[in-house]
Image: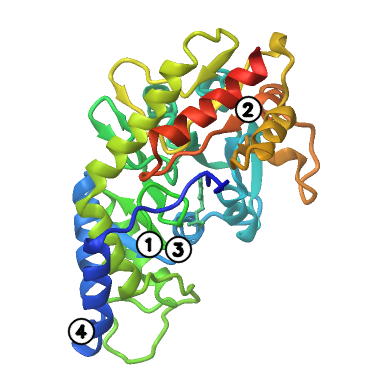
Amino acid sequence: MSRILYTKPSITALEIEFVTDAITHGWGDDCYGYIQRFEKEFAQYVGTSKAIATASCTGALHLGLAALGIGPGDEVILADTNWVASLAPILYLGATPIFVDVLPDTWCLDPAQVEQAITAKTKAIIAVHLYGNLCDMDRLLALSQSTGIPLIEDAAEAVGSVWHGHHAGSMGRFGVFSFHGTKTLSTGEGGIFVTHDDALYDRVLTLSNHGRAANQPKQFWPDLLGYKYKMSNLQAALGCAQLQRVDELVARKREILHYYRQAFAHIPAISMNPEPVGTQNGAWMPTLVVSQEAGITTDQMRAAFQAQAVDARVFFHPLSTLPFIQQTPQPTSLSLAERGLNLPSYHDMTTADLNKIVQIVYGLFS
Ligand SMILES: *Cc1c(COP(=O)(O)O)cnc(C)c1O
């Protein structure tokens, strides 16, 4: 019985051709060629004026927050339901995370709670588009505008998610994406910072290259203490190939979510990733949440999947419960973690794979 993985990248002859070219020719004068191309093409894809490719999404977020001058004494608001990568850069900079609850249907941060959590110390709001689901950008952007507090989009899980004509990641002060091997578009490891703000772009570019300003004529001269978070040319070559296929990659993700949604339409206790009118869900991670009344837990579901050699991932734990935070969890975040499960989704999965997963879920509800 071969194992069904929860996700893996789709690698074709195109990706191999691009990486082969980069490793053969991408040195010396050409050592940044694919990086520059990837940055330009990714910015075009999401609709921002600028992009900086990084070693990871965590690094991109760290750079962006640092460039905004966030540090000790500052507060940054984010949802309690999140992967630790959205939290860690706040802590690296010595700032204070303020956790708010998520909405029960989108699993993304609740704008009303964000508004209540704002204080004189609030320096940023991080909106994470969870599992491809979009945050309520109209309300969050309006809040950002009326308060002057920058809205940051962590769109690591939202390649292909579109809010009323605007790509996730392109609407806030800046956006970040991940190209980790589990994400919709992959460079193995990698990330990117995108923005419309030229001054912020310049600061992040300097910070991303050990504090060396692009216009500094003096060699080996860091103007300030920065970081080393650059993407390699080899990874960028892989990214360029994947970007040529991005519509195909997103379409397949959406097709898989749709397949599950249709199959579970007959089980009222199950809800899945929403797609409100006027939006497109990039469907990174098809996720099912079981109603409280049904009484089936994440642990029970995972055990049923494990028994059939199918990987399924638990819903994110509330960040407030992590050992280095230890705060009272937000109620909806805690409840979702007990009832939610990510289902396998990758480009090359077969209909037989999908049907096997559907059968396991039906077995739980029979
Ligand atoms: C994957 C992920 C990240 C981290 O990406 P890395 O490239 O692994 O640093 C950050 N935020 C979210 C929401 C993610 O899903």
- Packing grade of label 3 (10 A; few <14, some 14-19, many >=20) is some
For marks 1 and 3, give the CA distance.
5 Å
Q: Amino acid at mark 2?
A: Gly
Question: Does dot 4 land on a helix, a strand or a loop?
Answer: helix
Q: Is residue 333 above or below residue 4?
A: above
Residue under pointer 1: 187
Q: Tell me if the residue at label 3 has its CB under 8 Å from ligand 1.
A: yes
Residue under pointer 3: 189
Residue under pointer 2: 340
Residue for point 60% across, 52% down: 90
Residue 194 seen from this side: yes
Tell me, yes or no, whether the two marked residues, 4 and 3, touch with CB atoms within 8 Å: no
Sooner in the amino-acid sequence: mark 2 or mark 1: 1
Q: Nearer the viewer, residue 233 or 101?
A: 233
Disc marking residue 128: none
Residue under pointer 4: 25
Sooner in the amino-acid sequence: mark 3 or mark 2: 3
Can you tell which quarter of the image residue 242 is in?
A: bottom left
Residue 39 seen from this side: no
Can you tell which quarter of the image residue 37 is in?
A: bottom left
Q: Amino acid at mark 3?
A: Glu
Q: Amino acid at mark 1?
A: Thr
For marks 3 and 2, give the CA distance.
27 Å
Residue for point 22% across, 50% down: 245
Q: Position of residue 266 (x, y in %)?
A: 50, 8
Residue for point 44% across, 66% down: 55
Q: Position of residue 280 (x, y in %)?
A: 31, 27
For marks 2 and 1, give the CA distance.
28 Å
Q: Amino acid at mark 4?
A: His
